[in-house]
Structure formats: C-alpha cells, structure tokens
Image (tube, coloured by chain):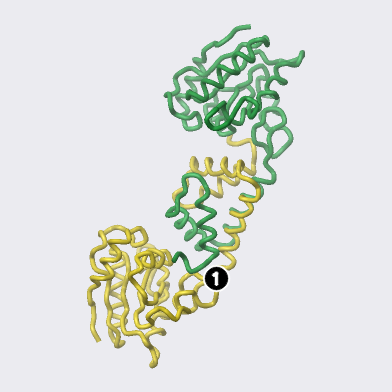
Chain colours: A green, B yellow
Amino acid sequence: MQFASESVENLIEQFSKLPTIGRKSAQRLAAHVLKMPTSEVSRLANALLEAKERVRECSICRNVTDTEICVICSSTKRESTIICVVQDPEDIVALERTGEYRGLYHVLGGVISPLDGVGPDDLHIRPLIERIGTPNTSVTEIILALSPTVEGDTTALYLTQLLTPFSVKITRLARGIPVGLTLTYADEATLSRAIAGRDTMSKP
Amino acid sequence: MQFASESVENLIEQFSKLPTIGRKSAQRLAAHVLKMPTSEVSRLANALLEAKERVRECSICRNVTDTEICVICSSTKRESTIICVVQDPEDIVALERTGEYRGLYHVLGGVISPLDGVGPDDLHIRPLIERIGTPNTSVTEIILALSPTVEGDTTALYLTQLLTPFSVKITRLARGIPVGLTLTYADEATLSRAIAGRDTMSKP
C-alpha cells in the first residue's frame, strides 16, 4: 500500500527517476507539489517541456542555446584566438563565473571512457577540428579544460596528439584543481589560478 | 553569466523552488533533463500537471485520492470502529507499511502551530467531529498518531479536550517513537511498537 492516489504515486515514480532523488525525497517533493499553487506547478511543467523543446546545441561550439549560435560565439567582445575545450555546458558556467577568461569555448559533450562505451567518435571532436583546420582560422591556442580524472586526462592526451599537426598552441589548466574533484564544482579561486597557470602541452 | 540558454536558466530557477533543492542540485537536474528522452520529460511534466489536476481530498478522511472517496474509506475490509488521526497523507503511507493497523484514518492537514499561523480552524477537525458525532456512528476509538513534537503534542491535547465529551476512547501512539523525529520517516518496527503500546488518554 502506497498513497491512495495513482496520480501521486506516478509523480513520485517520475521524480525518483531523476539523479540523486530517492523514494523518500520523491515523496517529499510530490507532497510539496500538491501544496503548490497550480500556476507554479504549470510553470515547472512548462519549463521542463520548453527546455527539452527549445534548447539545442550551438552550431559552432555545441554549448546549450535557444538560438542557432550561442551568445558567446556571436559576441564581438570575446577573443576569437583562444578556444577552451570543456566536457559539458555546466563547465562553461563554472569558468565564466571566474571572470578570468575572455576567449571562446568548445563543448565535447563527454570524455573518452571505454568502460561507459564512450569513444572519440561519440564526442564533438570533428567540429573542433573544423574550427581550427580551416585556412583562415584565427585560433592560435586551445586550452584543454577537462577534469583531472583518468577519463579527462585520457581525452586531453588524445586531443593533444590529434591537434599537434595544426599550428596551434595546446595548453591545459594548471594542476591547481584538487585531483578527483569534477570541474563543475570547483570554486572560483581555484579555477582562476588554474587558468592563469596553464601548462603548455605542445607548441607549434 | 549563467547558461547561454534562457530555457535552461528558467528550468534551473523552477527546480530551485522545490524544497531541499539548491542552485547546484537544480543545475545538475536541468543538465539531466536535457539528456533525457523527450518522452520521459513529457511523462514527468504530465505527472506534475495530472497530480495537481486530478488529486483531491477524500470527502470522508481528507486523504489524497483520485476518486470521491479514497480506497481505505471505501474498503469493506477495514475496521470502521477505529479512526487514526494523522497530520499528513504521507503519515498514512508510513503507518500502512507496518501492516499492523486495519482501521480507518483521518488527515488533519497540519498541526496547531501559532508561530506558523496555523490554528485549529485551519485543520480538518470539523469533519472529524462529524464522523464521530452522528448518532449512528460506529467509531469507538480515536488514535492520535501525531509526531511527538511540541506542535504535535499541543494538537493531541487540544483534540483530547475537544473529543472527550463524545463517547469514544482516545489513545495516542506509544512513546516508542524517538522524540524529535517526524512521523513520516520513522521505521516500520518502531511504528509497529508504537501502535501496539498506545496510551489511553481518556475513557468514555
């Protein structure tokens, strides 16, 4: 016996499917939803549908965006000579919070992880090569801003080998980041220091 | 600068409004939603709207239900001589899990809490009196299954005074429940013992 309402049980089940939300948390969230004004519940439901419907990948950097090209790629105030390669759009949010970086980004959409069945072909590596491989490219440096985990390091090494033939400087974030911590949750100060002290991995 | 997508930012904002979900958790949930299949996102959005639309209060016991009268009140297998008074529908789920109790329930919808501006008139006390006050009532016992907090105890005392004139036995759950823990999250064994050892507060 659970709740005497199928709708409530269904809501709890749907909530439980989200990461870090177990049965007890889902139950608490569902109880809260029942007490929320209908307008607030509609707003949450619409936000879910709209995010899924409207959000797409920037055709240049693969960041999340509501438009064809994201605000960073279309900005004239950003240095177009540097591309910072990150795993996920959340990492851009974390790096932007430092206020330290004025270049462009490129979202891989993951890292190489054979155990999870993720290989180089599953990542947005081809569009990155297109950005630096064209004859009139303005890019002179690639910063590999990947988490200092086994998968992040593997991906960084793979990209270094792949990008070395192009005449760009390849750097990676300084090892100021505490090893083991995923990049998204690093604090601003540590990230700032990591950008400032980035290591050269290959010179043209 | 946050996410380069208003839809994503809006979703994060809506998630943050839920209890126990802060900005970081909301960000993680939003990132997960973007990776979910559209069908799954629709299912969550619909579950939210449906729960708000279809769920109402049982006209007898005020439990959550999709029908006029809930499955417990309409069951012929329950003892109609005992009513267990609880704060919220979640408490019924917790009590039903023990398998110890076969009577009926009554949901108050809260407890008396002057600090939160909740008085007796804000609770479903009148429908409870109607259930035991009719001449042909079959109710002989009321179990007050409220959390052993200041508010829960205050409400239990208030109800005891109010219900004493009616010829029903009034009991409360035994103090096997660890004081301070809210009823919803007590474990089955403790709740079972609390039902078995319930104290008499007033005899007809």
* Residue located at (42% from left, 79% from top): B77
- Residue A8 image offset from top left, x and y in percent: 52, 63
Amino acid tagged 1:
Asp
| Residue B85, quarter of the rendered image | bottom left
Residue A119 lies, in percent from the top left, at: 60, 27
Note whether B27 is above or below B172 in the view shown. Answer: above
Q: Position of residue B74 (x, y in %)?
A: 48, 79
* Relative height, residue B83 to residue A50 (above, below): below
Query: Furthest residue to the right?
Result: A135
Kind of element beneath mark 1? loop
Q: Chain of mark 1?
A: B
Horizontally, residue B56 falls left or right of residue A165, namely: left
* Extreme residue in the bottom direction: B135
Q: Quadrant of residue A104?
A: top right
- Could you say where residue A185 lies in the image, as x and y percent from the top left? 47, 32
Give the quadrant of the C terminus of chain A: top right
**The N terminus of chain A lies in quadrant:** bottom left
Q: Residue at x 28, y 61 (%)?
A: B190
Q: Residue at x 60, y 36 (%)?
A: B3
What residue sits right under mark 1 in the picture? B66
Q: Is residue A160 above or below residue A57?
A: above
Image side of residue A102 versus residue A15, left or right: right
Q: Residue at x 47, y 65 (%)?
A: A3
Residue nearest the viewer, comparing B118 with A135? A135
Q: Residues within 10 Å of mark 1 (few under 14, many from 20)?
A: some
